[in-house]
Amino acid sequence: MRASFRWLPQLLRLGLPLLLALPLGWLAIDWLTVNLAPQRVHAYGQASYQGAMRLFADQLALRPGLPEAELRTRVTALQQRLQGLPLELRPLASLTAEERAVLARGEVVYRAFADEVLHALPHTEQALCLRLPPLPSMADIHLLVFGALALLVLLGVGLLQLRPLLRDARRLRQAAEALGQGALGTRVGRLHHPGLQPVAQCLEVQASRIEQLLGAQRELLHAVAHELRTPLARASFALALQPSAAPAKAAALQQELGQDLDEMGRLLDELLSYSRLDLADASQALQPLALAPLLQAVVAAHPRRFVPQLELPPALQVLGQEPLLRHALLNLLSNADRHARSQVRIQAAPGAQGTVQLRVEDDGPGIPAAERERVFEPLARLDDSRGRETGGTGMGLALVARLARRLQGRAWAEASALGGACLVLELRAALH
């Protein structure tokens, strides 16, 4: 509910100045009308009608003592000569004191709102009134001024709102340029405009991800160089000793050289498999796979020192891609067989929240609790000898972890009831 009203503060910032400006603008228009219009109206009346009203008065040929009835007759006759021009008499007593003062100065009274012009008739107590046709309404002018004022206010508010937006856009552009130039530590920070904050967050997440990937790549290259150094040194030593060695010793050196080359080949194969996961199509859909037949096929195709005990419900299915899942199962089985003393056990059971957990256990030396996360890193080993006798390349469990992520699952290590290590692969269950 709170998220649906995120626009309210921004709307108030935009609309409140407008709501305040509109009544103020209306009051300004009203003040101008009340204070400036009368003077302009009076000047307009004097300039437009004073000459005509004097001419009308002269046409009446007034004299002192003229009866009022005769005056009205003459006004009617003048009106007829002027083709029905609306003329009439108004007693001076019916006018305001201000209007009588204006007439006493020989000026006309122009009633703009009543559409009337008054002129005092000499030798009488009457004023000649000319009724004018109504002027066009001023409402459209008021509306035009009011609309122009509202438009200016909206334009000003819009510019005020646009300024932080442009400033934030400039910060985003500068951050993107810095990232493009290799400054991966660049961060945008908090922006003023809430609409651009998700863009900034995505940019920072991408920068952090790129920085992590490059760091992992550097560590992987360093580890690869370290891993290859030992078999290369042994191969170089064997080649150096071979010309002067006895035939039996030369054969042994030849065999060791072949083993070193095989070790380097396995390492390179695992590294290629690890890197190909970055290039694989991540959009490929996961398919329901029967776990028990797939695992039985992997066990049958790759015989090991120990035949694993399989405790698999036959109807259990997971979501995955068969080549990737087969590779992960093979690496888990190889790791357990390499470290087991006498037995390997594989169990599968439904997990929490629609998952399936596959457990591969052995009775070997196990994995210390402090090392259970590190064993899933590339080229991580629990021993420092890196010798041929330890077997493996240090990439098997790293591949398992990456394959699990590609299958929308995860992998971790824990202690086994057999006394050794228990490697858990958790995948999404296929709903029937």
Image (cartoon, rainbow, N blue to C red):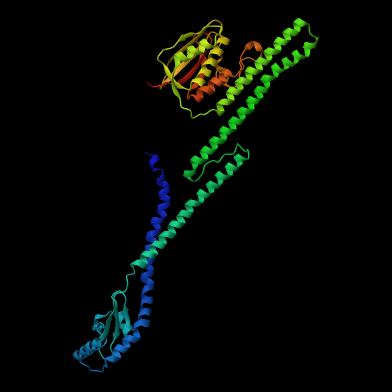
Quarter of image, res 180: top right
Quarter of image, res 27: bottom left
Quarter of image, res 95: bottom left
Q: Where 69 falls versus 147 (above or below)?
A: below
Residue 376 at x, y percent in the picture:
56, 20
Of 230 and 29, nearer the camera is 230
Residue 413 at x, y percent in the picture:
52, 17
Q: Where 131 falls versus 387 (above or below)?
A: below
Q: Where 235 falls versus 58 (above or below)?
A: above
Image mark count: 0
Quarter of the image for the N terminus: give it: top left
Instruction: Tell me: 306 left or right of 27.
Output: right
Q: Residue furthest left?
A: 69
| Any part of residue 359 in sight | yes
Instruction: Tell me: 217 left or right of 246.
Output: left
Q: Residue at x 30, y 91 (%)?
A: 58
Residue 309 at x, y percent in the picture:
48, 7
Of 409 and 286, nearer the camera is 286
| Any part of residue 125 in sight | no
Residue 360 at x, y percent in the picture:
50, 13
Quarter of the image for the C terminus: give it: top left
